[in-house]
Image: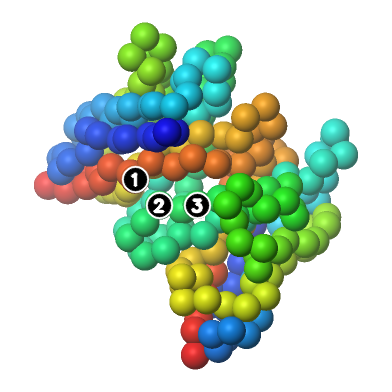
């Protein structure tokens, strides 16, 4: 199985400032078809997760452009250009390269100063 | 509107069985890949099962042999049968849709149904 590793907490960030969250996979997420199937989800307290980013860097419909994804191989990053109050919660990365055996990272809680 | 509504959760004794349902609207369960993802209290997300459009099914190793995913196309509903329930099955169970065609991400989530296994 591919293991996805995330830090449990982000670096503390002030509202309006940028934030980044890292995700590392135990093996390359480059699929045999040449694509990389890494997505990011956000879960606010008491709510189900929602999709933010798919295939490393593609924003899902309705996701604000302050969210961006990057990375390749085994190292990936989610960036928030200016943190807003509604961005609180936990962020998960997920791999689908080993479809259908999807695996999630443990989640990173966005820490607001 | 695309919507997933889970039901069937509750308090169950260890060793018992339970069938969760997921009523789907806005798309067809027969032409989309749909999965179950669970989340133990205060913990992260764990994929547990998927059913393909072909009807093929797959399970996480942690639940294989005890869970059965199925669907009723006429009711547009997804099910998850859980047998031999254990304390570690205690979780919110989410019904999710995989992104159409590519199936690489979960783009629609239900609100979840809570399953508590305790005596």
Residue at position x 50%, y 15% in the image: B30
Is residue A26 positioned above or below A6 on the image? Answer: above
Colouring mode (rainbow / by chain / secondary structure / one colour): rainbow
Evaluate whether label 2 is on the same chain as label 1.
no
Quadrant housing residue B77: top left
Quick one: SS at disc 1?
Answer: loop
Residue on which disc 2 sits: A48
Is residue B114 positioned above or below B19 on the image? Answer: below
In the picture, measured across the screen, residue B88 lies left or right of residue A13, that is: left
Q: Are marks 2 and 1 in contact (CB under 8 Å)?
A: yes
In the picture, measured across the screen, residue B47 lies left or right of residue B66, that is: right
**CA separation in Å, label 2 and label 1:** 6 Å
**CA separation in Å, label 3 and label 1:** 11 Å
Is residue A107 positioned above or below B92 on the image? Answer: below
Specify the subunit that label 2 lies on: A
**CA separation in Å, label 2 and label 3:** 7 Å
Residue on which disc 1 sits: B111
Residue at position x 47%, y 20% in the image: B29
In the picture, measured across the screen, residue B76 lies left or right of residue B108, that is: left
Residue on which disc 3 sits: A50
Residue at position x 61%, y 42% in the image: B105
- Badge 1: residue crowd in 10 Å (few <14, some 14–19, many ≥20): some
């Amino acid at each position: 199985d591919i293991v996805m590793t995330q830090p449990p907490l982000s670096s503390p960030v002030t509202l309006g400032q940028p934030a980044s969250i890292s995700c590392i996979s135990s093996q390359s997420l480059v699929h045999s078809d040449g694509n990389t199937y890494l997505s990011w989800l956000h879960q606010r307290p008491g709510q189900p997760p929602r999709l933010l980013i798919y295939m490393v860097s593609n924003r899902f419909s309705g996701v604000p452009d302050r969210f961006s994804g990057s990375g390749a191989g085994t190292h990936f990053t989610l960036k928030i250009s200016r943190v807003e109050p509604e961005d609180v919660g936990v962020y998960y990365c997920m791999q689908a390269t080993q479809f259908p055996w999807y695996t999630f990272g443990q989640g990173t809680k966005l820490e607001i100063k | 509107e695309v919507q997933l509504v889970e039901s069937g959760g509750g308090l169950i004794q260890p060793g018992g069985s339970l069938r969760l349902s997921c009523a789907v609207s806005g798309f067809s369960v027969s032409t989309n890949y749909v999965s179950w993802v669970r989340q133990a209290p205060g913990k992260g997300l764990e994929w547990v099962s998927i059913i393909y459009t072909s009807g093929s099914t797959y399970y996480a190793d942690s639940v294989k042999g005890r869970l059965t995913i199925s669907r009723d196309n006429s009711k547009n509903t997804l099910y998850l049968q859980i047998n031999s329930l254990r304390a570690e099955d205690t979780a919110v169970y989410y019904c999710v849709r995989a992104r159409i065609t590519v199936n690489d991400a979960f783009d629609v989530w239900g609100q979840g149904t809570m399953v508590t296994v305790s005596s």
